[in-house]
Amino acid sequence: MALQNIGIRLLQKTQNVLVVFQKRSKAIYTNASCFNEEEIKEKLQAFPGGSVDLIKQDSGIAVLTINNPNHKNAFTGTMMIQLKDRIDQLEQWTEGKGLIVQGTANTFCSGSDLNAVRALSSCQDGMKMCMFMQNTLTQLLRLPLISVALVEGKALGGGAELTTACDFRLMAPGSEIRFVHKHMGLVPGWGGGARLVRIVGSQNALKILSTACKVDQDLALQTRLADDILVSNEEGRPLEDALKWLSDFTKGPAAVIRSVKKVVLSGRELTSDEALKTEKEVFGSVWGGPANVEALAQRPKHK
Ligand SMILES: CC[C@@H](C(=O)O)C(=O)SCCNC(=O)CCNC(=O)[C@H](O)C(C)(C)COP(=O)(O)OP(=O)(O)OC[C@H]1O[C@@H](n2cnc3c(N)ncnc32)[C@H](O)[C@@H]1OP(=O)(O)O
């Protein structure tokens, strides 16, 4: 009987956390805010090319690759749709603990495909693409996985914005993050402006956006846009080093690592009272859980 009660309690708690968490990962724009996802997907389908590839490793760390090397990994319309589909997949990956976002051919991403940008030049179409990508990158940042943008080569425009939609940024030697929007008569549109302020503070964000400067490794460390600098550019080494870097944060049961991200996410995004209530729900979902019971069965000594 007792075991059955524990099972029921655990199920109820997990469902509570799921409800709380699903509310958080709700899209920014929905049909209610005159945003029709299917309609914009139809428009984006008209701009094919490249792919967004996903590999989920047994370690619980996935690698998402922006793959359009002939165009410096620029996002075509179909790649924007694939990005959303991959993030939906990751949202359902219950064994997931970490994610690395990278580009192919030693470069990160050069933003939107300029051919698509030119074709979507009406204010209405631009806003629809903007809302689609804001929803998608917000969903990426809110995944219950610890995410790292692995920047090799250039991350420009929307590519720079994509780096801000990860929890951490690692930069390979000689790489740069550059918000080129001003030079295009624009401001960030994929949510990168709002996220940049939260990462580097409003003074640094204003300097970076108003000058459209190249944020190299030194400036990225100084402004805390980058969390670490990798030592090698050798073929394959940046990804190897990034996986190792991230592994320090993802050691342990997936349920616990995912709960850590949920607690930090709520602290980062919610009001104090809401964050405390979410923390309570998440705490309840792991208290008495398998990892907790196992830890208590040993004589924990944290030297
Ligand atoms: C919200 C922001 C979002 C938006 O407004 O929708 C944007 O991101 S707008 C796009 C912002 N990005 C750019 O403006 C980058 C433009 N590209 C460059 O500055 C340079 O290409 C580079 C990325 C610095 C690389 O320069 P280089 O090494 O000299 O290579 P090439 O210039 O010859 O480029 C190789 C190849 O790739 C094509 N390319 C590069 N970037 C894009 C892009 N964003 N869209 C489409 N195609 C791109 C470039 O045209 C070359 O192709 P070919 O001409 O066929 O050889």
Image (spheres, grey):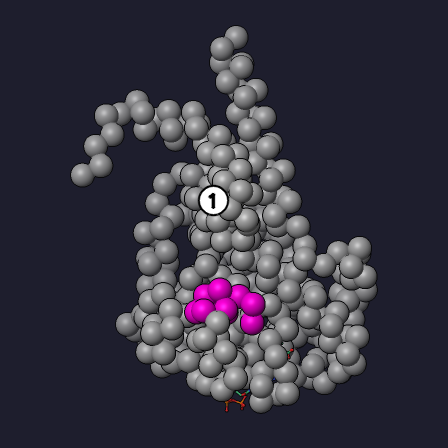
Q: Residue at x 52, y 8 (%)?
A: 1
Please state which of residues 85 and 287 is positioned toward the viewer in this rendering.
287
Q: Quadrant of residue 194?
A: bottom right
Q: Which residues are magenta?
A: 193-201
Q: Residue at x 62, y 70 (%)?
A: 190
Outermost residue on the top side: it is 1
Residue 146 percent across, percent down from the top left: 45, 53
Please state which of residues 197 and 51 is positioned toward the viewer in this rendering.
197
Ligand 1 image position (quadrant): bottom right
Most common secondary structure along the magenta stretch: helix
Residue type, mark 1 in image:
Val
Q: Residue at x 37, y 56 (%)?
A: 246
Outermost residue on the left side: it is 303
Give the tally of numbered discs: 1
User: Residue under circle 1?
Assistant: 263
Residue 20 percent across, percent down from the top left: 60, 40
Asked whether, in this view, residue 53 is left or right of residue 119, the answer is left
Res 89 seen here: yes
Q: Quadrant of the C terminus?
A: top left
Residue 224 percent across, percent down from the top left: 38, 69
Residue 36 percent across, percent down from the top left: 80, 61
Q: Residue at x 44, y 84 (%)?
A: 214
Please state which of residues 210 and 99 is positioned toward the viewer in this rendering.
210
Asked whether, in this view, residue 233 is left or right of residue 286, the answer is left
Indicate yes or no whether the magenta region holds residue 68.
Answer: no
Asked whether, in this view, residue 58 is left or right of residue 245, the answer is right
| Label 1 CB sits under 8 Å from any ligand 1 atom | no
Q: Is residue 143 above or below residue 238?
A: above
